[in-house]
Image (spheres, rainbow, N blue to C red):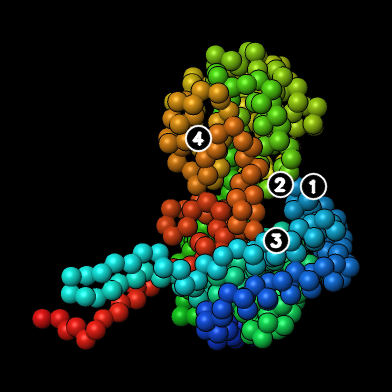
Amino acid sequence: MTAATVLKSENTIAAEMRRVAQAAKAASRPLALADAETKSQALRAAAAAIRAQEKAILEANGKDMAAAEDRSLTAAFKDRLKLTPDRVEAMAAGLEDVADRPDPIGRVQDEWMRPNGLKISRVSVPLGVIGIIYESRPNVTADAGGLCLKSGNAAILRGGSDSLHSSRAIAECLREGLRQAALPEDGVQLVQTRDRAAVGEMLRQHDLIDIIVPRGGRSLIERVMQDSTIPVIAHLEGICHVYVDGAADPKMARDIVLNAKMRRTGICGAAETVLIDRSQAEKQLPAIVDDLVQAACEVRGDAEAQEIDNRVVPATDADWETEYLDAIISVRVVDGVTEAIEHVNRHGTNHTDTIVTNDVETAETFLSGVDSGIVMHNASTQFADGGEFGMGAEIGISTGKLHARGPVGADQLTSYKYVVRGGGQTRP
């Protein structure tokens, strides 16, 4: 390929991404003004289209899966990529759940009267145009597009190249929903090229795109946060912890650890590290390891864990900061809740962490001391999901601290403005 050909390709992608962003900006205005029923109508029509197009969606996914097989991608990656009839139905049901939720736009968050008679209200409004950059999970196309629609935002979706066929079929169902509700179909647009240059062009459209939401591995997040000229709501990797306290119920601890790791190993809410209180390690760790090994999970651990159970293989320092997304887990023996909190805050990614204990005071110490977007007591980390939180769906789990934190649903895809009503007041 000559330099001139490369330049022509880059110019074409730049022009196309500019066109997409301009179309999204134009669509964002009527979407922002759409009433609740119209948006819900669009979401329900999109859900109906997904059900009607199930065969086409699964056929498209079959193409993506075949390409994944040819590339010998990991089992965890292929699990994230794969669609089944149940997963297609879950996408449709998720859109209907979002449609049934209260409209997040136009809510009066606060209001007060000033001594001079001015009435001031703080009212929720859409963010505008949201660019979502994600990797292999095609269901994110439905979740992200639906949540943006519900919150009156236009969405530019840049899915992973591995899921392009699947995402294209799903995005068309969302656009069909918009058409049926007489809303601009460019309210949801899928970037059609696999060329990574499109991401760079997207990150430069600061005059047209209001927020970027990256969802994927560390390399994607770091690139977006480094290169973006647009504010970012980051979904960093999920290095999630289960701390088994000395006052934990043994059966509950086993059930939670096994579910948190093995229900689906390839999702961001999967546990990657188990911390266990030294006072109970000899009693509880072998049974926990039994469950994990029987489920074909490799267990890596510190010297103390290895001494307790010889099936535990040595962990390295890197293991404490690795998102495996696979049937591998690291185990460390700690001296109570204080050391557990220190470990989580040092090695975690501020995603989701849980404590298993029957001691309420210890639980509260953990919940207040761990600096993560989601902290749990006696529950599996796999509940770190907007649908499980009653949001209908999520655009991701924000691990940052500005604007949104934890599951990002329709409510979190809003900003606010101040509305001031007067009666002729002038300022002296």
Quarter assignment of residue 54: bottom right
Q: Position of residue 233 (x, y in %)?
A: 50, 61
Q: Earlier in the sequence, mark 3 or mark 4?
A: 3
Q: Which mark is residue 266?
A: 2
What residue is rendered at 43% in x and 36% in y? 368
Q: Is residue 158 above or below residue 350?
A: below
**Residue type beneath disc 1:** Ala
Q: Which mark is residue 75?
A: 1
Q: Earlier in the sequence, mark 2 or mark 1?
A: 1
Q: Which mark is residue 150?
A: none
Q: Is residue 388 above or below residue 243?
A: below
The local secondary structure at tag 1 comes to helix
Pointer 4: what residue?
344
Q: CA distance from mark 1 to mark 3?
A: 25 Å
Q: CA distance from mark 2 to mark 3?
A: 20 Å
Callouts 2 and 1 close, C-beta under 8 Å: yes
Pointer 3: what residue?
94
Q: CA distance from mark 1 to mark 4?
A: 27 Å
